[in-house]
Image (cartoon, grey):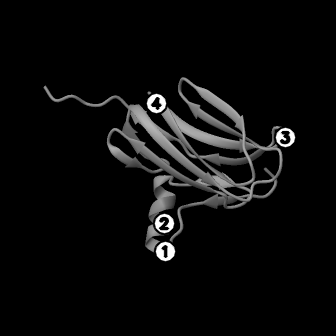
Amino acid sequence: MDDGFTCTPTTTDSATLLSQLQAGNTYLARATCLELEVQTPRGAATLGSIQTAGPWTVQLHWHSLPGGRELRIDTDSTQVVQPVSENGTQTLELEVGRWFNLEIRLPDGELYALTNPVWAEPEQTVT
């Protein structure tokens, strides 16, 4: 990536921004282009967090992407690769055992955006 930004969820509060950066609630991109919502068995998740493994629902919104790009959705056991339009929304149901992240690639394979992972661990049982 020649030029890029570290992107976080929108905030005007400097303490919130610092907290987001420290927690890894970020993605790298050539432009701010993604909104990501992740629901896990434990509830909503942010990038960089540790959640309970299992079925996750991921909703992704993107905008203003350059032509010919593809979305790669990765988990510890699966990779989904598909072309995407300039703007769009997608909801995915994923089985996540250890981690999830996504990236957007240009036609020549060059990286356009890459999220930090959301980590997963087995649910702890109390005996």
- Among numbered discs 1 and 4, the one appearing first in the sequence: 1
- Label 2: few (<14), some or many (≥20) within 10 Å? few
Name the front one of labels 1 and 3: 3
Amino acid type at image mark 2: Leu
Residue found at the far top of this picture? 77
- Label 3: few (<14), some or many (≥20) within 10 Å? few
- Asked if the residue under mark 3 is in contact with the one under mark 4, i.e. CB atoms within 8 Å, the reply is no
Q: For residue 18, which numbered disc appears in the image?
A: 2
**Marks 1 and 4, Cα distance to the nearest angstrom?**
33 Å
Amino acid type at image mark 1: Ser
- Label 1: few (<14), some or many (≥20) within 10 Å? few
Q: For residue 14, which numbered disc appears in the image?
A: 1
Residue bearing the label numbered 4? 96
Q: Is residue 99 left or right of residue 114?
A: left
Which percent across, then down, holds residue 59?
52, 47
Q: Is residue 42 left or right of residue 103?
A: left
